[in-house]
């Protein structure tokens, strides 16, 4: 990350930010105060809205709403304007007025000067449900704690489709994305959907907004599992180029973690455009979809915890992070990313047996598929790289063989607001990325994956995801040998056909698929091998490359631990 995109350092939940989703509760009402339109927005894991919850939204959000006599079209005669970016303020005092049943009030409130346009209404008065609007209502909402000088919001009222009617936000350099929240688009139809106050998302009931933070957070961790040696970092390599290759990554960075991720937005002045996902994938339909017209960078630089001289941790549960305490860096989402992440690193092995032996390893590489770098707003991503005793780095001049086996790294994408996710990528040529799903999404601290997980393996070869059909094998490592299993050791066992007491072929519910789940519960179109419902144990995935890399080896391995 020079022109660079300096991140401060997708799990916990944007830590505080990634859990900043709001969704009101159903509330029993003993009276129906006239079918006034009422808005609610509360923390989805809290049974009732509180002032602390509202503070996350700056105690204010803006609503734009239209009603429809026919299907939404964008025509003024049909899509009648009801709420022109009304300000809705947290005042607590639930049920004190007909328009405040959950702490939020819009009557008599006002728009912050310069914050949002259009906002030409001279007053904010009560609006009632209109049952002649046969096709119901559509509502949009945004909340900003950023100043008008840093973020000017404009509602978009035209578009190619109804999903294009979002917002544009003019951002000044240094604008804080953690202060911007966009709600899911709310469509409330009338037919068969009649309610009263206390009925959420019902025609005649209450409108609940689920807000998502505009920011993404990223952090990087590293650890090593090389027996008999400790590992210290020497340098990372990168290049300021939109089409990097490992050969062109020659600029050395020793002060922090560097990797090439082309076209990441740099956080300078630009325009944020908000549209909404369409019905192509109904699980995410109407969720906000963000894009940027802003200065971009071709690499990232994170923190100062991974730099020359840093001795790496030895466990995946407590890796060495780029920032102290695993702090995240706020970054711009890049939902449409189509570029891989390329990592190139030098490090030193120092014997721990007291004799002081030193081995220099140079040019070890890893590549994370573009699919797993499509950063979404309101998610936090953690990439953890594991240095194991398989190496594609050189221990001599770069014309020498790249070691017995490629060095593998694990890259993990961790917890999200809607659950947990982890992607594990071997750093090798080719690179293997695994993603496990159990009970929705990945659950951390269970080895690599939790027992019962479906594990998906994606192969990147020469910077492209490939179809693994006919080029892979899966093995189950014998329990008695599991503690010895690492990628290099497994390769040795298989090369020497030790079999049975060391490993057996594993084919139960193994298949090639064309999509994998993503952290938001949707799916991504990408070739992968699916290992369904893995029981506790240690497994090895083998992939045979199209061509040998430096040396004579074409097979690369990934050890998968399930607990």
Image: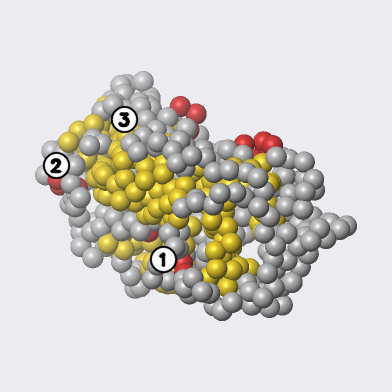
> Badge 1 local density, few (<14 within 10 Å), some, or many (20+)?
some
The percent position of residue 472, horizontal first and vertical second, equals: 37, 67
Tell me which label, 2 or 3, sits earlier in the chain: 3
Residue drawn at 59 percent across, 77 percent down: 69
> Badge 3 local density, few (<14 within 10 Å), some, or many (20+)?
many
The percent position of residue 98, horizontal first and vertical second, equals: 77, 53
Q: CA distance from mark 2 to mark 3?
A: 24 Å
Q: CA distance from mark 2 to mark 1?
A: 57 Å
Q: Nearest the camera: 71 or 336?
A: 71
Q: Secondary structure at mark 3?
A: loop
In the current view of this chain or complex, which residue is farthest to the front?
122
The percent position of residue 363, horizontal first and vertical second, equals: 22, 41
Q: Secondary structure at mark 1?
A: loop
Q: Which residue is mark 3?
A: 256
Residue drawn at 67 percent across, 41 percent down: 90
Tell me which label, 3 or 1, sits earlier in the chain: 1
**Which is more foreground, mark 2 or mark 3?**
3
Q: Nearest the camera: 160 or 226?
A: 160
| Cβ–Cβ under 8 Å for marks 3 and 1 | no
Q: Is residue 164 left or right of residue 561?
A: left
Q: Is residue 314 left or right of residue 173?
A: right
Q: Nearest the camera: 172 or 402?
A: 172
Q: Is residue 437 visible?
A: no
Residue drawn at 48 percent across, 33 percent down: 326
Q: Is residue 76 visible?
A: yes
Quarter where residue 534 is shown: bottom right
Q: Which residue is mark 2?
A: 398
Q: How many marks?
A: 3
Q: Which residue is mark 1?
A: 158
Q: CA distance from mark 3 to mark 1?
A: 45 Å
Q: Secondary structure at mark 2?
A: loop
């Amino acid at each position: 990350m020079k022109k660079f995109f300096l991140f401060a350092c997708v799990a916990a939940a944007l830590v505080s930010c990634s859990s900043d989703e709001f969704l009101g509760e159903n509330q029993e009402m003993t009276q129906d105060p006239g079918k006034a339109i009422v808005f609610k927005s509360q923390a989805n894991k809290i049974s009732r809205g509180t002032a602390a919850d509202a503070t996350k939204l700056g105690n204010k959000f803006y609503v734009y709403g239209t009603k429809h006599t026919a299907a939404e079209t964008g025509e003024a005669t049909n899509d009648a304007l009801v709420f022109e970016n009304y300000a809705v303020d947290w005042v607590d005092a639930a049920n004190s007025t007909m328009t405040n049943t959950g702490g939020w009030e819009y009557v008599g409130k006002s728009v912050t000067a310069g914050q949002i346009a259009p906002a030409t209404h001279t007053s904010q008065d009560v609006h009632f449900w209109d049952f002649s609007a046969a096709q119901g209502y559509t509502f949009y909402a945004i909340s900003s704690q950023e100043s008008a000088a840093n973020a000017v919001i404009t509602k978009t009222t035209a578009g190619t489709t109804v999903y294009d009617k979002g917002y544009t936000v003019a951002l000044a350099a240094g604008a804080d994305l953690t202060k911007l929240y966009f709600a899911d688009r709310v469509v409330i139809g009338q037919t068969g959907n009649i309610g009263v106050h206390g009925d959420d998302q019902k025609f005649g009931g209450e409108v609940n907004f689920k807000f998502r933070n505009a920011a993404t957070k990223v952090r990087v961790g590293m650890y090593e599992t090389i027996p008999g040696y400790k590992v210290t970092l020497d340098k990372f390599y990168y290049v300021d180029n939109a089409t990097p290759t490992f050969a062109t990554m020659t600029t050395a960075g020793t002060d922090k973690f560097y990797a090439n991720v082309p076209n990441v937005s740099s956080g300078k002045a630009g325009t944020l455009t908000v549209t909404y996902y369409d019905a192509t994938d109904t699980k995410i339909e109407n969720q906000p979809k963000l894009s940027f017209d802003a200065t971009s960078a071709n690499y990232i630089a994170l923190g100062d915890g991974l730099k020359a001289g840093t001795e790496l941790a030895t466990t995946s549960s407590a890796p060495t992070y780029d920032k102290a305490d695993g702090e995240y860096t706020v970054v711009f989402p890049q939902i449409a990313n189509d570029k891989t992440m390329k990592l190139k690193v030098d490090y030193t092995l120092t014997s721990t047996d007291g004799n002081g032996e030193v081995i220099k390893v140079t040019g070890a590489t890893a590549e994370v598929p573009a699919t797993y770098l499509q950063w979404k707003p309101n998610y936090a991503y953690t990439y953890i790289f594991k240095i194991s005793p398989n190496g594609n780095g050189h221990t001599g001049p770069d014309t020498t063989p790249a070691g017995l086996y490629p060095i593998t790294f694990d890259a993990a994408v961790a917890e999200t607001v809607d659950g947990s996710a982890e992607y594990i990528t071997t750093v090798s040529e080719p690179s293997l990325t695994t993603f496990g799903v159990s009970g929705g999404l990945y659950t951390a601290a269970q080895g690599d994956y939790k027992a019962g997980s479906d594990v998906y393996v994606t192969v990147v070869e020469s910077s492209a995801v490939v179809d693994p059909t006919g080029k892979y094998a899966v093995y189950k490592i014998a329990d008695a040998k599991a503690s010895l299993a690492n990628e290099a050791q497994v390769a040795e066992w298989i090369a020497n056909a030790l079999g049975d007491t060391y490993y057996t072929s594993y084919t139960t519910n193994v298949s090639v698929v064309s999509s994998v789940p993503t952290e938001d519960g949707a799916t991504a179109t990408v070739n992968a091998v699916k290992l369904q419902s893995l029981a506790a144990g240690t497994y090895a995935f083998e992939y045979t490359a199209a061509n040998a890399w430096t040396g004579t080896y074409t097979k690369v391995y990934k050890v998968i631990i399930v607990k």
